[in-house]
Image (cartoon, grey):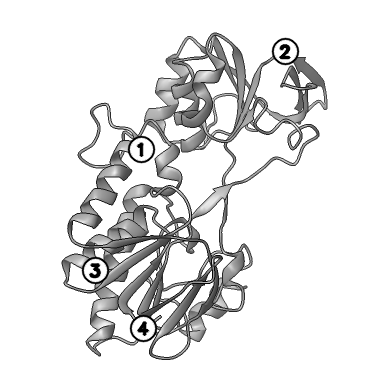
Amino acid sequence: MSEVYDILIVGAGPGGLTAGIYGSRGRLKTAIIEKGRPGGQAATTMEMENYPGFYKEASGPEIMDEFLAHAKHFGTEVIKGQVTDLDLQGEVKKITTKSGETYQGRTVVLSPGATPRTLGVKGEGPLRGKGVSYCATCDADFFEDLDVVVVGNGDAAIEEAMYLTKFAETVTIIVIHDEGVLDCNKMSAEKAMKNPKIKWIWNSVLDEIQGEELVEGVNVKNIKTDEITNLEVNGVFVFIGSVPNTDFLEGKVALDKQGYIITNDRCETDIPGVYAVGDARVKFLRQVVTAAADGAIAAVCAERFLEGHVEGRVTPELLSKLNK
């Protein structure tokens, strides 16, 4: 535990990796602690047409591999481990992993990301991994020439549905809104509407997932008529948002009612020298490009904090506003 890093980053998503790039390029001793594959949710998204400069056959895993290589190129150390405890008070912060290792940093950047939200319907839990999936990139090829449903209508849901059409026979999207109303961006909506493999069920929610060893069908409920319709399908893909991975931060930094980390526009938390980036912080838009921006801001603020120019702290006024 003798080594002290200038910047310790928890999580190697797009925000954490960008913080690593900026930190190590600024000649600060920088390390990222990551329990799984670097890249976060972006590393499981095959189609990524909206990240600047990577619109030609670019995939999420490929772009995240470039982020990781970029960070390592400038000297960012990547440490394998699951963070279980943090002591963020004082000039030197301490982070402990499940294996019992403790790492020290003068500043900390929190980039824990988020995980997919579940539906909570009958059959979802028992059939998870047996036809129920939350990642088209991971599982689409298991459903070649089969019929699947997608639950959700935001950017992620529609983009993943488009990807599924490369494998599945049909992709039926269950939408809670009236016909033609989607929460995704207009370009994705237009492309999906024109795709001959995509079918639509409007004003409806998924009521039940059926099957013994594998998914065999679903019950769909119309929210206006309460009518239940049964569909024979082989797969269910759920894209209805995410939950921040911040349980381990309870009592460590300020969180809002949903568990997102409260920061100001400099990504500063309520603890001096501690920053938060990416999908786990309170923000308007959760995308790779905004996570990368967060990482750059946090690393530069951390550098200035170490120079004594900035005292990172969320104001009581901001805390009060976000916790109403």
Residue that mark 2 sits on: 232
Q: Which of 131 and 31 is in front in this view?
A: 31
Q: Earlier in the sequence, mark 4 or mark 1?
A: 4
Judge whether 183 appears above or below 84 on screen. above
Judge whether 14 appears above or below 10 on screen. above
Q: What residue type is labelled 4?
A: Ser
Residue that mark 3 sits on: 23
Which numbered disc, 4 or 1, marks the residue closer to the eye? 4
Mark 1: few/some/many CA within 10 Å (<14, 14-19, 20+): many
Q: How many numbered discs sit on the rendered protein?
A: 4
Which numbered disc, 2 or 4, marks the residue closer to the eye? 4
Q: What element carries label 1?
A: helix
Q: Which of marks 2 and 4 is nearer the N terminus?
A: 4
Q: Earlier in the sequence, mark 3 or mark 1?
A: 3
Image quadrant containing the C terminus? bottom right
Q: Distance between the residues labelled 4 and 1?
A: 37 Å
Residue that mark 1 sits on: 60
